[in-house]
Amino acid sequence: MARFFHKSSEKAGQTPGTAVYVGAAKHETVTVERYEFDEVDLECAEAVPLGSVQAPRDSQKTLWINVDGVHEVDLVQALGTIFELHPLAIEDIAHTGQRPKVEDYGNHALLVLRMLRWNEKDDQIDDEQVSLAIGPSWVLSFQERKGDVFNPIRDRLKSSRGRIRKMGADYLLYALVDAIVDHYFVILETLGDRIETLGEQMAEDPNRKDLVSIRHLKRELLFMRKSVWPLREVLSSLQRDGAVSIHEETVPYFRDVYDHTIQIIDTVETFRDMVSGLMDLYLSSISNRMNEVMKVLTIIATIFIPLTFVAGLYGMNFAYIPELQWRYGYFGALGLMGVIACGMLIYFRRRKWL
Amino acid sequence: MARFFHKSSEKAGQTPGTAVYVGAAKHETVTVERYEFDEVDLECAEAVPLGSVQAPRDSQKTLWINVDGVHEVDLVQALGTIFELHPLAIEDIAHTGQRPKVEDYGNHALLVLRMLRWNEKDDQIDDEQVSLAIGPSWVLSFQERKGDVFNPIRDRLKSSRGRIRKMGADYLLYALVDAIVDHYFVILETLGDRIETLGEQMAEDPNRKDLVSIRHLKRELLFMRKSVWPLREVLSSLQRDGAVSIHEETVPYFRDVYDHTIQIIDTVETFRDMVSGLMDLYLSSISNRMNEVMKVLTIIATIFIPLTFVAGLYGMNFAYIPELQWRYGYFGALGLMGVIACGMLIYFRRRKWL
Amino acid sequence: MARFFHKSSEKAGQTPGTAVYVGAAKHETVTVERYEFDEVDLECAEAVPLGSVQAPRDSQKTLWINVDGVHEVDLVQALGTIFELHPLAIEDIAHTGQRPKVEDYGNHALLVLRMLRWNEKDDQIDDEQVSLAIGPSWVLSFQERKGDVFNPIRDRLKSSRGRIRKMGADYLLYALVDAIVDHYFVILETLGDRIETLGEQMAEDPNRKDLVSIRHLKRELLFMRKSVWPLREVLSSLQRDGAVSIHEETVPYFRDVYDHTIQIIDTVETFRDMVSGLMDLYLSSISNRMNEVMKVLTIIATIFIPLTFVAGLYGMNFAYIPELQWRYGYFGALGLMGVIACGMLIYFRRRKWL
Amino acid sequence: MARFFHKSSEKAGQTPGTAVYVGAAKHETVTVERYEFDEVDLECAEAVPLGSVQAPRDSQKTLWINVDGVHEVDLVQALGTIFELHPLAIEDIAHTGQRPKVEDYGNHALLVLRMLRWNEKDDQIDDEQVSLAIGPSWVLSFQERKGDVFNPIRDRLKSSRGRIRKMGADYLLYALVDAIVDHYFVILETLGDRIETLGEQMAEDPNRKDLVSIRHLKRELLFMRKSVWPLREVLSSLQRDGAVSIHEETVPYFRDVYDHTIQIIDTVETFRDMVSGLMDLYLSSISNRMNEVMKVLTIIATIFIPLTFVAGLYGMNFAYIPELQWRYGYFGALGLMGVIACGMLIYFRRRKWL
Amino acid sequence: MARFFHKSSEKAGQTPGTAVYVGAAKHETVTVERYEFDEVDLECAEAVPLGSVQAPRDSQKTLWINVDGVHEVDLVQALGTIFELHPLAIEDIAHTGQRPKVEDYGNHALLVLRMLRWNEKDDQIDDEQVSLAIGPSWVLSFQERKGDVFNPIRDRLKSSRGRIRKMGADYLLYALVDAIVDHYFVILETLGDRIETLGEQMAEDPNRKDLVSIRHLKRELLFMRKSVWPLREVLSSLQRDGAVSIHEETVPYFRDVYDHTIQIIDTVETFRDMVSGLMDLYLSSISNRMNEVMKVLTIIATIFIPLTFVAGLYGMNFAYIPELQWRYGYFGALGLMGVIACGMLIYFRRRKWL
């Protein structure tokens, strides 16, 4: 449940714009990374003390500040003050558990996304809120935990190759969003493999445990859908409104991420269809097996019922039962039973019940 | 039923704009609260006689009048006259049971919301209509009963801190709406806990009572949905139409409540999915158990049928049945029965029916 | 069926704009009522001969002509000619069985509504087409039968109080529409009571008759929905297009009726959900009862099967069965049977089958 | 299947704009009808040779050319050349099996409709593509077969009465569309009667044949829906785009056909609901009957099982069974059996299983 | 699974705009075809070395370059450089498994489609991504494999007849799209035949294998739908946005393909309905047969149970059973049994259980 709905009742009634952290209590240290670069230079520091963070003076350079951990609300607040973030933006950053959304506050904007990772231990999708604040020449990224999908971006920044060093804050924003969305495909692949494996195994021998697996897959797909679905609207409004000061040459890149998102949504829906199909397969194979059991058993019972009647007939103690005195009476009775049994078998087979 | 549909047949055919109270008859006294404030001063009175209520002369100050109880229709009418409310607005305030809506009457507007609270005694959601009338420098709030979710706002007003004293009537309106919507999260949390508890308990031992709980949860979710769903449209049109004289700096706040509303709707839908899942779980576990019973019992019956037939066979009274005279006939018959029984058990097990 | 689909095949191929009456043949006399009024004067006549009906010369006054009965097509045609109605408007008035709609013909407009009433005798909703033609200073209303929901309007006109005498033809139109829509709430209340009563009764003792009641409620709700659903679009387009020469001060009133319509549609959908819930309740309680019967009966049968086998065993006629000669053999056999029966009962109870 | 999907694979890869006839091979002669008229004159010819067909020189007159049969592709091509139809229009006319659509080619437009008729012989709906090409002063209509629903239009043209002679090509187009749509009501009536009859008969005695009838009705409704549904969009775009040079005074007439189309779609959906209801009725009555059979039979079996056990008990051959020697033992046993049977019957009845 | 979701996790984190091939590894040689033509001349070469491919100098002529095989990423990259394709376009071409889409990059555009072919061997639909890049006077087409549906276009180009040589790059684009869409009808025909055959066979003798066929058809229809559905939006935005420098005279042609696409989607939905109907038919016929088996068997059992009881009765060993001594006791018992059996048969038949 916790994954589907972040408790926020303690926030009810608070002054709007108050930063309150609502995730699980945490004791990790918060770390701050800082990259300042243009096409030529790159300054990069991996554990910056808060005091030394400043809004960029030189707007020619692009500044990226990445914060791992938003449970130290004061730090978020301090950064918010330095970069003049809107109070509601600060609240949304600290208050994890937001739906993906984009909010334009005039001179800066806030993009909230869900970063998904497959948790091998619990065999489920873990999610984390990533908040991206973007100003004219800077991007702030806030994550809940250490560990992310941004390493390729760090590498590209450092190796000094390509567009990312030239194209400013909006392209950096795109790169971060793209990294998160690209990782959704990895999750999809894991889920796809599960569905395929389960399908193959159930074709051979469906059993009760499969029901648990199906319900598990269903829940993970529901969870994934909840994280990806609103992204469609977010990215579409990013392109449409021309907000967030996105340059014209960056627009096709955002359109590309948008297309990926639609493809992911499509695939999630297809997977949901397939899992429903597995459920139907399970139910029909269970009911089929049960029907077969009942049918064969009922047929056995039915064949013996007339035979048992015949046996009962000649077990009666009437003083005068002519057949009983006949020398071959017993064999005659056995023969009669055989005829009845064969007759019923033929009848059943002819009506295709066997 | 009463919660889902407020009787209003007695109103049919009345002159439009007639204030008619349609809730349960009530004998509570109606109380009127009054707050008049600007950044510097705050006048506040908690039980104001009607005579002393006046429309604000000094439009520099913001006036908030809160009425607990709309069953004294004359009072509502009197207030309506003082603040020059549209007759239809007065009718809507008195005629509780309205869908959430916003109505712009040119120089003032009316916002109707449902305030939800969890009723521990009846184990269900209670709702109450809150009507918010807003003019250039005043807000009137009408509730059906004493007791509300506005205390944090009263505290913030009195403690003189923050935006609420500076930003005028539209921000006050926002604060009231936000308080109501924030409280929805508290209800969601209660419902979420119920669903989780029920799910865990059913995984262990599903029984008939769970069906009642499921139906109960379903009804509460339906009720909640009915109250929250129209709010989406209301808040979206508030932003869009620029009606109700909302200043530009208040718009992001309303957008924030709008986002919360969408998150609530999303969660309600997820919860409905989960409750449907519980229903499926119940049905499948009941049918599963029944199938198991039938299967085992049928198998027992089927094994004994051939045995009983053999017993019947040697209970026949034919004069000449060779086996009967054989000294070990009885043990032979017992042996035959044992072989048949084992054979059938092996057959059943091989076909995985056992 | 007749209520759901008015036969109109005889009209196929007719010249468009031909007035053809398609309801049941009728012999009632058609009556014409006439109200002409302004704020000061009111002329009212209750059985006006056709000859004396004239288009208003004095456009300062508002004219309302109400016709009970459209089966005398010539009368409709004559009125149409006097007020210069469009041929298609005349066709729609006579050809009852129209979907609710609004049609703007430039200098006048036609509003078609369904007036619903609960028919106690047949225990179903009766409907009737009400066509409202509106011109600059007149309203014509056509009904299929005597008896309507307009009496409060007549009273208000005569008692000379309020807006209806001052605000012209568009407000009169609103008042007529509002009277019809308000009456829908009466129908809803009747249906709501039925659903509630049925639900309570089924919780105690569901039986086959309930199925009939459920199907009956379903049909009435379908019927109601068919009448109300298109009204939403009609009223929304009335506001939007500014057609039908509606004055600005009348617009909020139409918006109010629109809100009522949405509330009715919402309630109808909620009722449909509830009736579906009743159906599920019925099905699950029936299948539950059947399962219980089958289970208990099967258990009884299963307990006796091994006992009967034991009895059969000692009914065999082998020459040498040692137990038979034992003095306490009979009591031993009875004891064995008792042990078997108890064992099975304990086993069943432990697996919770009993 | 053929009715649902016209084979067109032979067309794949052809030059676009090639007229290829794809219906069943036909040997009927193609006939061409020609009407040229204004308010005063009417020239009409019923079997015109192709050579004499010419585009209208005198644009004061309206020209209607009706072609029965499009399998002679050359003729279609020739007419297309005379009236300068767009190659794609010619292709659509010949290539029957199009969805209803409207296509504007600048100086002329093409309207494709499905004309439905009830085929008594095969007890199903027959359809035929009617393509209507409209230019400034002419209308060409192409049908697949002889026989149509246009006779009332021919009569009205010849009898010289009314609007059709005065209002030009667009009104003629409207008249043709209206005739086709009006005939849909005839089909609906036939279907409605079938549904009603079937419902009444099933209430009395549901049997397997009803399933066939239900499936048949379902298919016909699906077929009808497929033909009517796209018409809504077609007629709505005709009004909206102001295309096809429709005069302002003809617009209300097209709006009227549009309303009819919506009413037909509504009724088709209602009928589909009703047929689904019949299916549910069938399924529930079948399962109900089966359950009753099983219940009564199981009860009979269950009552006799303990009785048979008692009989078996006293059929045992133990040397010492005290009851056997008792003089009234037999009658005592019979009495015991009677008590058991009555006890079970009372128990069953008390639990309402009987 | 592979057909429904192309693995792309290896791409996650790559620099956007990197061409990575994600299909199955391939060793086919890539071939490049080249057509350059205007109304008068045609140069055509079927295996062009990469070095000789150049962007068109003479923009009067139309250039078509068709590449069979995109797994040699370098070649795609090289072509992209020559024609100045956008990096994202190059990535989409190489990264097969895209949803159909259109992307406008200012001076050129990219259209991605799925080309479907029926694979007789695996009895399923094969798909292949076809990427069409269009510039002012050139079209590049990229396919995954040799073999396509473009031969009629090649023929038309060479035979020098018709519009395709005159109307420039946008008409060529249309021709390619039309060829792909036309081929969908061939697939539909195959699927339609399958559904019809299966339906006929199941009406006679439904069996377990049909379930497999139904699931197979369902999957193929799902697959087809996934490929065709997005095409609707693509073609509609092509017309709407006026992008891709489409001349006005080509617009009706694209509208025609759009209509075909809608017809295909419609047919796919109809087929899905029909397959669902087959599934229902299967389930109802299976459950029907099972019910019949159970009913007849239960009736047989039930008739014999009382008979067996009577036999057991007279098998009791009481010392005094008067009937036993009666000379015709045996025949009397047989008669009694006959009466019971006949009585039950009559009762069953009267209640229509037989």
Image: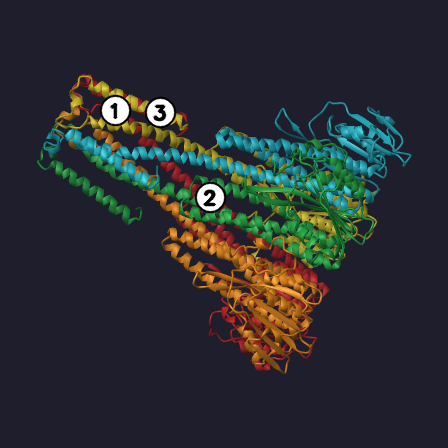
Chain colours: A red, B orange, C green, D cyan, E yellow
Q: Residue at x 45, y 34 (%)?
A: D286
Marks 3 and 2: same chain? no
Q: Earlier in the sequence, mark 1 or mark 2?
A: 2
Number of residues whose C-alpha sits closer than 10 Å to that of mark 1, classed few (under 14), some (14–19) or many (20 or more): many
**B325 left or right of D354?**
left
Specify the farthest residue to the right: D58
Read off the chain for label 2.
A
Q: Position of residue E24 (x, y in %)?
A: 57, 49
Image position of A131 (left or right of D284): right
Asked if residue A309 can be seen in this view, the reply is yes
Report which residue position mark 2 lands on. A281
Residue E36 shows up from this direction: no
Q: Are marks 3 and 2 in contact (CB under 8 Å)?
A: no
Q: Which mark is residue C269?
A: none
Which numbered marker is on residue A310? Answer: 1
Q: CA distance from mark 1 to mark 3?
A: 19 Å
Residue in the foreground of this view, choosing between B181 and C57: C57
Residue position marked by numbered label 3 in the rendering? E345
Q: Could you tell me which secondary element the residue under label 3 belongs to? A: helix
Chain designation of label 3:
E
* Residue A203 point in image, percent of width and height: 45, 43
The one of C120 and E197 positioned closer to us in this rendering: C120
- Name the image quarter holding residue B175: bottom right
Tally of marks: 3
Secondary structure at badge 1 equals helix
Locate residue E241, reporting x and y percent: 75, 53
Question: The disc labelled 3 sits on which kind of residue?
Answer: Leu
Amino acid at circle 2: Leu
Query: What's the residue type where badge 1 is placed?
Result: Val
